[in-house]
Each structure stands twice: as structure tokens, then as C-alpha cells.
Image (tube, helix red, strand yellow):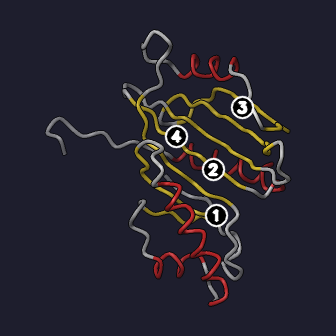
Amino acid sequence: MSLPAGWVVWTPGEADLRALSGAAATTKRAVLPFSRGVGAVERQAAKGRGDVVQVGLRVPDPAAGLVTGSLFLIHLPRPAGKDGTPLTARQLVENRRGQGRARGRIYHHHEVSLVTVPAGPAVLSNELSRKSWGMRDVAVLTTDIFPGGADSVFRLELTSHYRELQQPALMAEISHMAHSFTVDTPGPDGA
């Protein structure tokens, strides 16, 4: 998967802070906010969200080191319906459209759609909301990719607390990632 400018990724639990800081923070002052962001995303990855394959941070200005978004690439079992049969991407869209909104949240925007990316069908979810007692909006964009013939899905999840980034920058960035995403399948000899 290729990344738009401003993103840095690593395998969870393997954050080489010195190397990551060199890639994302160009001043000594920028290292502290960036380091805090690395720690926060590592803690989130450890909370058991499926098999987290990659985590990352969005740092559009390396001189400031301000983290404006997080990325999780998660490998999950294929979603199943109430009867236990695996869902198609189209069925997942219908299920999500039929679900109620989470209690305790105020939604400014919520959209679910079906697209096709090179790796297979994908379900896009775009949500802008805040806790009903809070003041801070959060943008969450997810793309669930259904690789052809696989019994699992890959979820790209981007989150940002910077409302102004929700449209169109994050949408363009997750689209770029999803369209460049590939799944390497082992050959007949397992290699």
C-alpha cells in the first residue's frame, strides 16, 4: 500500500522512535508531540481490534510534529450475518445502513457506500460525530476491503480530531491507500 505525503507507518510494537522521528519530525521541538502520538497509537493498537498489521500517524508538517490523524490496517475475519454465513461487501453495506446510530453521539455526517478497488470490493464508511456531552468532533473513515476469494477482510481506518481535515483531504488519502492496497497470496509451494 502506498501512502500519501505526510503519513508514516510501522508494524505495531516495533516503533523505532529514532527512525520514525527522522521521517516525520524535522526539529527537536517536533519530536515530543510526535513521540506522544506514537505512544497513543501503540496503546490503541494493543486494545485488541483484530490482527493489527500496520499503524501510522499523519504528520503533515514535520517542523511542528503535530499529529493530525491515525491509521490502522487491520486483518479481520470476514463479517457474518445473523445465520453465521459470510457476508458479501454489498450485504455489509446494507447491514450498516440498517444499523442505528451509537447512543451518546451526535452525528454531523454518516455515509456508507460500495466501491471497487484493485484488491476487490470495498465498503466505505465516512462518519463525523462527537460525544453528546463533548465539544470535540472526530472524523472516522473506514474502508473494508474484501480480497477476491479470501475468508477475511482488511480494514483501513483513519481517525482525526481535526474536523477541517475530514473533507476532502482524509477522503482523498484513504482512497489513495485503498486503491494502492494489494494482498500477496502464497504460491502453490507456500512461498
Q: On the image, numbered disc 4 is attached to which residue?
A: 155
Q: On the image, numbered disc 2 is attached to which residue?
A: 158
**Inter-mark Cα distance, 4 to 3:** 20 Å
Horizontal and vertical percent position of residue 143: 59, 38
Name the kind of residue labelled 4 in the image.
Arg
Of labels 2 and 3, the one closer to you: 3
Q: On the image, numbered disc 3 is attached to which residue?
A: 102
Mark seen at residue 58: 1
**Inter-mark Cα distance, 3 to 1:** 26 Å
Horizontal and vertical percent position of residue 31: 60, 82
Q: Secondary structure at mark 1?
A: strand
Q: Secondary structure at mark 3?
A: loop
Name the kind of residue labelled 2 in the image.
Leu
Residue located at (65% from left, 23% from top): 96
- Say which label, 4 or 3, has the lower sequence index: 3
Disc 4 packing (10 Å; few <14; some 14–19; many ≥20):
many
**Inter-mark Cα distance, 2 to 4:** 10 Å
- Say which label, 2 or 3, has the lower sequence index: 3
Q: Secondary structure at mark 4?
A: strand
Q: Quadrant of residue 183?
A: top left
Q: Does 163 sit above or below residue 15?
A: above
Q: Are marks 4 and 3 in contact (CB under 8 Å)?
A: no
- Say which label, 3 or 1, has the lower sequence index: 1
